[in-house]
Structures are given as C-alpha cells and as structure tokens.
Image (tube, rainbow, N blue to C red):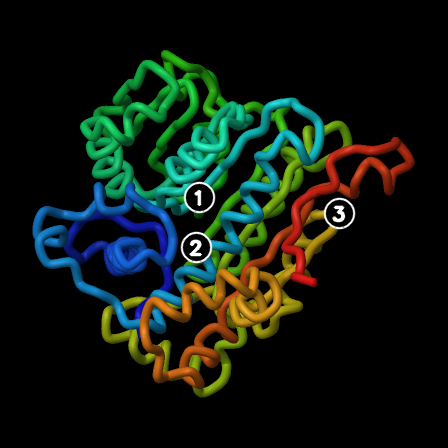
Amino acid sequence: MLPPRAPAAHAEQGAHPDAAVRSTDSDALVSRASAAALGYFADPFSSLFLSPQQRRTLDRRPPLIHIGTHARTWAVDSLVARFLDPNVGPHHPVQVLSLGAGTDTRFWRLRKQWADAGKDWNCARWVEVDFPEATTAKARTVSTKPDLRSALGGDVKIEQGGLALSSPLYTLLPGDLRSLSALSESLLSPSTSPTFGAPLSPSLPTLLLVECVLVYLEPAATDALLSWFALTWGADGGAGGAIVEYDPFGLEDQFGAVMRRNLAVRSISLPGAASTPSLASLTERLRRAGVRGETGALSVRQIRDRCIDADEVERVARIEQLDEVEELNLVLEHYAVAWGNLRASSEEEGQGEDKEGIRLEERR
C-alpha cells in the first residue's frame, strides 16, 4: 500500500523526524506521472519534477493506484475549478492557499485548461506552502523550466536564500503548519516578498486546499489551522472562501491496521487518523472550526460511482485491465474529499443572488 501524499521534499530520509513524511511526496509524484503517461488525465507538468533517473525508468504504478489517482484528481480539480470560475458568481478575483503542496501541479494544469478554453484567469494569487526542503527543490525546478516559469504571470523572483519563489500570480513559501503564528505572518505580511508584497490578502475570497496533509498533524494542530483560516476569511466582514481537503478516514478497521504497519516500516505515523473515524467526522471537523456554509464529503468510491461522468468512467476502465476490483473498492472507501463553504450563501442570508459555493454534484 502506498502512503498518502504529504508535505514532502526531494531529499533522502535522515534523522529529522519529518524526513519520512517528506519522502511520501515522491510516491505521489510518480503516481501522477505514471497515470498521466497512460492517459488517465492530462498533466504534462508532473514529469518536469521527476529526477533524471525517474524519467529514464518511470516506475509504472498498478491500475488500482492509477484509478484512485484519477478519481481523486478529478474531484479536487472540479471543486477548485468551480471556486475559480467567474461564471459561477461575481467576477471579483479570488485566491488559493495550498498547504503541504509538495510537487503538486494543479496551478499549471488549471492555468493551461483556462488558456485552452479562452477563459480569463480569475485567481489573483496562488500560494503554496511546504517544508523548506520541498520549496527549495520546487523553486529551483519552476524557475528553470520554461513551461513552468512562463505561467507565473511575469517577473519571477527567487527569495529567502532560495527557499521561496514569488511572481505576480504564484508564490511558493517555506513553512511549518504546526507553527501557526509564523505561518500567518508569512502569508499576510507585506515584508514576506519585497517585490510583490503580502502573498495573500484578507480582502479576497480564498480557497484553502489541503490534500492528504491533515492526517499527518496532531488533531489539535489541525483544529487550530482550520479555525485560523475560518476566522481570517470567514468571520463577519471577512471576504469568504472555502476549504477542500482530501484525507483517509475510518482507519480503525483491519484495512487501517495493515496500512499503519506498512507505513511504520518507513517510520511514518498518522497522528490525525483517529480523529476521522467516519465520513461524517470530516464535515464535523469543518463545522467545529467555524465553517458556516454548506459542507459535504464523499468517499472516493462514491465519487467514482456517483459523480464522475459515466463516459469518463468507461474511458478510464478501458486504459488498463483491473483484476483487483474488491481491493480497489476497499481502498477507495477509506479515502474522501470533503469541502466546506466558509459562509452561508448570500441568498440564504437574504441578500439576493451571489456565488452558490463549491460542491460535488452527483450525476443524474
């Protein structure tokens, strides 16, 4: 069983307690590149983050991993795209904050989709945060690859001694999600980037994206992080926004026990797993943090069975022969995408029509 995605770096595991967790991003990167190479989804950018050795001999993942990666990517992409789409609501700019982003390529993939469709890019700033080891490697790759650099909206600056990268549309910052005061300061302070100012503005609607990150945090750290975000953008008078998360849940069964043993071999633990015993616990956590608008959560199996267009499911099924259907369903039943809108819609508050918020729609 491959570990879930987490804050990571292109570095060998060492004595540092976070090194094992950082290493899991390499697994996720190879899985994305492997799935994209076979046509599960379009991602011409993941391969740019592979090491030369990985590119020469790409480790092809099994169909089970490819199918799960496709469904998870489809769901998160759909929610983020809805938040960014100016046709859904007001035409004011928005922001995205992706924590524990690792080598994620969603910014570039969506930028390309918007350009190919002739749509205006509505995201004023896309900000990614990860361990310094991760941001150093990513900043170097982004700044030296023309296909990545050209999407950043103009001038590109390497900052903080190579740990950070800033541009008009995209910012990459080092940070520790467990050090909330320092994280908040780096995201909201104009001094963070001498060239472009504060990475994020409290006056713009903001999406928080956390993909398989919270399970690696202690529950108290997760609650503090989500509450900080909800208070900063969702309190009365705040700009509003939403949260999208992808995490495992219900790991107190035999599947979870096996998963924990496999991860323990790599010195990886899941401090947050016990706090999400059920699908409902994911949305309860968002409500507890101060999310007041619509929330929802679906397992990845439910997303594949009920949300992804049937033609797309059939297309994916034709790519490779899958023999382990029961194993696939077991894995997908233990991972979920959850979402929450920070505030109730304006219509619910009696203020007329406004952006309806993000959600995954089940197909009819």
Q: Give the SS element for disc 2.
A: loop
Query: Distance from label 3 to label 1 (Cα)?
Result: 22 Å
Q: Which mark is residue 213?
A: 2
Location of mark 1 (residue): 99
What is the three-letter code of the residue carrying label 1?
Leu
Label 1's element? Answer: strand
Compare marks 2 and 3 and give the one earlier in the sequence.
2
Type of the residue with mark 2 = Val
Tell me: residue 344, above or below residue 59.
above
Which residue is at 62% across, 46% downward? 227
Give the farthest residue toward the right.
Answer: 350
Give the mark nearer the N terminus: 3 vs 1: 1
Query: Contact, CB < 8 Å: mark 2 with mark 3?
Result: no
Q: Residues within 10 Å of mark 1 (few under 14, many from 20)?
A: many
Picture residue at 27% right of the left edge, 43% below the top = 134
What's the CA distance linking mark 2 and mark 3?
22 Å
Q: Nearer the viewer, residue 147 or 17?
A: 147
Q: Residue at x 74, y 51 (%)?
A: 294
Disc 3 residue type? Arg
Q: Residue 291 in the image: x percent, y percent?
A: 70, 48
Q: Which mark is residue 292?
A: 3
**How many angstroms separate mark 1 from mark 2 (CA)?**
8 Å
Depicted 298 relative to depicted 261: above or below: above
Q: Nearer the viewer, residue 213 or 28?
A: 28
* Element assignment for label 3: loop
Question: Vertical placement of 60 versus 328: above or below?
Answer: above
Residue 276, percent from left and from top: 56, 68
